[in-house]
Image: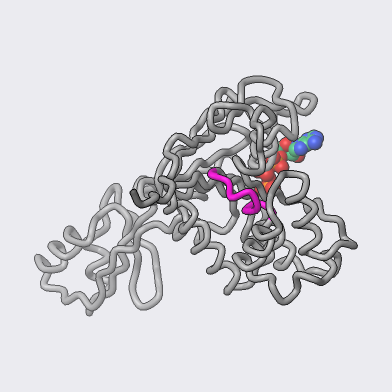
Amino acid sequence: MPKLAPSPRLDTVIEASHLTKSYGSKKAVDDLSFSVRPGMVTGFLGPNGAGKSTTMRLLLDLDAATGGSATINGKRYRDHKAPLQEVGALLEAKAIHQGRTARNHLRALAATHGISRKRVDEVIGIVGLESVASKRAGGFSLGMGQRLGIASALLGDPHTLLLDEPVNGLDPEGVLWIRNLLKALAAEGRTVFVSSHLMSEMAVTAEHLIVIGKGKLIADTTVAELTANAGVSHVHVSAADNTSLREALTRDGVTVTDADDGFDVVGVDAAGIGEIALARGIALTQLTTQKATLEEAFMSVTRDAVDYHGSAQ
Ligand SMILES: Nc1ncnc2c1ncn2[C@@H]1O[C@H](COP(=O)(O)OP(=O)(O)OP(=O)(O)O)[C@@H](O)[C@H]1O
């Protein structure tokens, strides 16, 4: 009988249940519950200081929770017999011996986890570091360091991946590469949990989103749902007689604001604006529904959970 390729495991799941972590009186993670399923990329979003890195550290048993639990595939990270083969992780802080070459760093990691040297060369190829594999990691750029970190995460061919800001420091080619890599890993049936500040990137990479603020869950949703419910979509309008159309549209519940060569309307949809224009005999020159971007939706749902507000002069 022909040997079948191993089927993707569908039981892998990351689970936080009432997870809490306090530093003194500060609750970095506050009664946080969510689960991350296989087969899709799950984005982990939140403003600065929301508790994303702390949650990742708790999931990886690098810090002890004050309350609740964090498990990966039903067990705490430390209870897995071969953690590197079960869970691959990339955290923000680099823990790389600066004097070692990239290849030797990966070989040392592989040797302590019963992983072959062949796999080391494979992951160097996957992350595109062949030409610098015999160079000291200490001299690596931020982007090369990220690729080496991702190579370490992939070393054990794990079913679950936790990546904290993997896009950090990557150039546009690198950003595109990581997008395709994460999607491909998820499509193989793996569980991929990835934090990022780059909303435009998450919008095209992730399907499922966990949004937190001040340590608490704000949304457990899909990219499509979050943008649809953000309530910040508007219609861009331009007409032969903008002044008359603006007057005709002005009523309670409708907001009209100036925009390039026309105006933006919130509170009436494109069909409604078309009908009003037709009734007044005003010719429309532009009528475009502009959906909220993930960035706008994110700002809207996290507005009350932002610790650090900047000001534009
Ligand atoms: N070791 C620590 N001691 C004291 N406070 C800490 C510690 N680690 C994190 N915190 C605090 O916990 C909160 C959450 O921090 P965390 O780094 O998890 O947020 P984050 O969402 O990853 O932020 P960012 O997007 O800026 O990386 C912050 O207020 C931070 O100052």
Evaluate whether residue 295 shows in this view: no
Per the rendered image, the range of residues in magenta is 152-159
Instruction: Name the residue located 39 percent from the left edge and 53 percent from the top edge.
Output: 232
Q: How many discs appear? A: 0
Residue at the far front in the pictured view: 1
What x and y, as percent, mark residue 250? Answer: 27, 57
Residue at the far top in the pictured view: 67
The quadrant holding residue 81 is top right
Q: For residue 304: magenta?
A: no
What x and y, as percent, mark residue 54? Answer: 69, 37
**From the image, which quarter does the C terminus lie in?**
bottom right
Instruction: Name the residue located 11 percent from the left edge and 72 percent from the top edge.
Output: 281
Q: Is residue 61 above or below residue 227?
A: above
Name the side, left or right, on which 46 lies relative to 54.
left
Instruction: Identify which residue, 35 or 275, lies in the foreground.
Output: 35
What x and y, as percent, mark residue 304? Answer: 56, 39
Instruction: Name the residue located 87 percent from the left edge and 60 percent from the top edge.
Output: 98
The quadrant holding residue 278 is bottom left
Instruction: Name the residue located 17 percent from the left edge and 60 percent from the top edge.
Output: 271
Q: Is residue 67 above or below residue 208?
A: above
What x and y, as percent, mark residue 162? Answer: 60, 45
Name the side, left or right, on which 42 lies relative to 95.
left
Q: For residue 156: magenta?
A: yes
Main SS of residues in magenta = loop
Name the side, left or right, on which 16 lies relative to 228.
right
Instruction: Identify which residue, 121 or 228, lies in the foreground.
Output: 121
